[in-house]
Image (cartoon, rainbow, N blue to C red):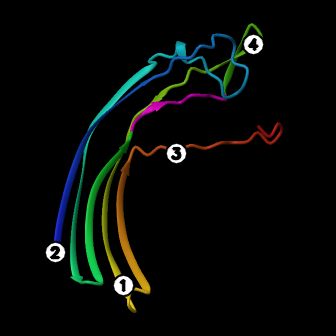
Amino acid sequence: MKRKLAIRSRASAVSSLTPTTYFGPCLTPSASNLNTQNPNSSVYSGFKSRANLSYKITDDALVYYTWSQGFRPGGFNRASTGHLPVNGIPQYFVPTTYAPDSLVNNELGFKTLWFSHRLELNGALYQEDWTNTKCSSSILNPVSET
């Protein structure tokens, strides 16, 4: 078969709830009482698809194009290093939620075999449109190194 077309789709729903059993003061910078968070739950749903078209030029050479969608569900920031002293005890800020991100990907590529399958040479070009991207980071305190 020289040409091949594959199309796939999926529906998804992701629910998040942030219960915890600890009800005391926050003892570490990465602790939060998530039971008091408002909102403390979220639901994200979506429908994502993928299509791939490939063409086998010879038995040892193939070119392809792929279009696909993806996402990462939203959730909760589970910690905050900022705090307010309440009766001399640090109480950390209530975490907030974050929205899902989404991705649309375009890929154009080739796969080849050379010298009786002893050498494989592949290549691809990508174009991604990633919206509402989330990145995590850690910032060390130079005094306490935490």
Identify the mark nearer the N-term, 1 or 2: 2
Q: Residue at point 32% right, 77% down?
A: 110
Nearer the observer, 121 or 146: 121
In this rendering, would 115 be left or right of 64? right
Residue extending farthest right: 143
The structure residue drawn at horizontal position 33% and vertical position 31%, both measured from the top left corner, is 44
Residue at the image point whose x is 34% and y is 78% from the top:
111
Q: Secondary structure at mark 3?
A: loop
Q: Could you say which quadrant of the image residue 56 lies in?
A: bottom left
Q: Earlier in the sequence, mark 2 or mark 3?
A: 2
Q: Which residue is mark 4?
A: 89
Q: Is residue 54 left or right of residue 121?
A: left
- Label disc, if present, on residue 135 of the rendered structure: 3
User: Is the Cβ of the residue at disc 4 closer than 8 Å to that at disc 3?
Assistant: no
What is the tally of numbered marks visible in this picture?
Answer: 4
Assess disc 1: are there few (<14), some (14-19) or many (≥20) residues with their C-alpha within 10 Å of its C-alpha.
some
Specify the segment rendered in magenta.
73-81
Report the Cα–Cα distance between label 4 and label 3.
31 Å
